[in-house]
Image (cartoon, grey):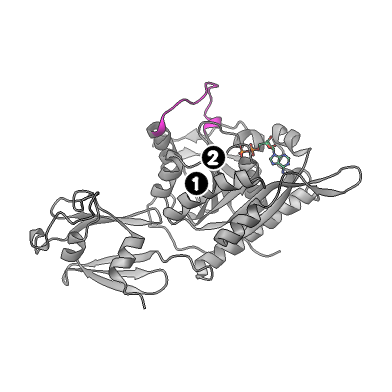
Amino acid sequence: MSSVVVPATPRPAGSPLAGVKHVIAVGSGKGGVGKSTTAVNMAVALAKLGAKVGLLDADLYGPSVPKLLGTDERPTQEENGRIHPATAHGIKIMSMGLLGGDAPVVWRGPMASRALNQFLGEVDWGELDYLIVDLPPGTGDIQITLAQAVRLSGAVIVMTPQILAAEIAKRGLKMFQQVRIPILGLVENMASYVCPSCGHEGALFRSGGAEKIHAELGLPVLASLPFDPTLVGEGDDGRPVVLSRPDSILAKAYLDLAARMAAELSAVLSGARNEKPTIAEMKPNHEGRMFKIVWSDGVSSLTTFKDLRYQCPCAVCVDENTGHRKITREQVREDVHPTKVQTVGNYAVQVHWSDGHDTGLYGFDYLRRLLVKQA
Ligand code: ADP
């Protein structure tokens, strides 16, 4: 059995997810395509293949993970505030659905974002190879909050084969690309139907969606899962098919999906997938008054504190309509220096400057264009 455990760059010590190697989001353009079922079965499959796995149900408005895993175990909280996740089938789980109360969640964005940050920051996830995050459908506050709060290793996008669903999925794909979360691949769900009587396998919907996206965007199709009529009942009973019917076509397909996801992750991390470079290290040298930036593709670049402060891309420094810079180089103090540098998700750094300015998010793409002369 090949290992699905993929090495990772460590997160900073003391950060909430310090023990978590990879955070993988499972998303979809619209609801009802089988995203949660895929997230749960992929998580169970990864655990079955030897990985330490957690599952965060970020579908705060419609949590279905507890039901799919057949648990109502409550997470516990210590006096110091740390929350211990529930466990089911060897997987650590956190979900609004485990916190009690039958009232539907009618929060607006900011409250939901706060809850997600709590799930990420105050839950003791311990040592994990994978934290799988079951996202709500679409591209909203939760997706953005997640992208800003943690370094995601990648995303898996689930869709049904209809062209229409694929078009909606494409919007979701763009959002992940904008915040530099590598899309590890697509899962085409309910792609075919195997007749239980005669074994004939036929297409269920008008097909071609995943291939179209594959052709247009070059993304791998990680799995093409058949429609399985018994899955709905199993989901209702909290028995993931990977465990309840390990020899079924679907269970094998989920195990293949887990292995292929891990293989794509390795490819992305080794640079074989040619993702856009990210910043691996950004170190201030206070004596030389400059930053040294090392990129994930090995390129390094230098920039002075003064120049980087001058090139701040925020709306205070640049006119949003004309694109003209509103400050001059002379207005920037000679002794300006960073007081704090923070990475934002996978896509930007925020520098707090000694002159009190901290509204600039320097996107990786922007810094790369600014600092690296392309051959
Ligand atoms: P989403 O998270 O996208 O809203 P769910 O995972 O909740 O979707 O799945 C929606 C419904 O479709 C559930 O009843 C689930 O059991 C069913 N379902 C998902 N995948 C399959 C499949 N491959 N075969 C049969 N039913 C499926």
The residues colored magenta run 96-109
State the quadrant of the N terminus: bottom right
Instruction: Say whether residue 277 is left or right of residue 334.
Output: right
Q: Nearer the viewer, mark 2 or mark 1?
A: 2
Picture coordinates of residue 334, whole percent (x, y): 9, 64
Q: Which is nearer the eye, 40 or 188?
A: 188
Q: Residue furthest front?
A: 322
Q: Is residue 4 magenta?
A: no
Q: Is residue 258 visible?
A: no
Tell me if residue 284 comes above or below residue 111 in the rendering: below
With 342 as the anchor, is 52 left or right in this view?
right
Residue 114 in view of the camera: yes
Asked if the residues shown at circle 2 and circle 1 are in contact, with their CB atoms under 8 angstroms apart, the answer is: no
The residue drawn where x is 75% and y is 39% is 231
Would residue 303 be found to the left or right of residue 253 on screen?
A: left
Label 2 within 8 A of ligand 1 by Cβ? yes
**Mark 1: few/some/many CA within 10 Å (<14, 14-19, 20+):** many
Comes first in the chain, label 2 or label 1 = 1
- Seen in the picture, residue 6 relative to 99 is either above or below; the reply is below
Residue 213 point in image, percent of width and height: 59, 55
- Identify the disc placed on residue 137: 2
Residue type at mark 2: give it: Pro
Q: Give the quadrant of ligand 1.
A: top right
Q: Secondary structure at mark 1?
A: loop
Residue at numbered disc 1: 125
Kindly report the secondary structure that dominates the magenta region of the rendered protein. Answer: loop
Q: Residue at x 72, y 32 (%)?
A: 237
The C terminus appears in which quarter of the rendering?
Answer: bottom left
Amino acid at circle 1 = Trp
137 shown above or below 333: above
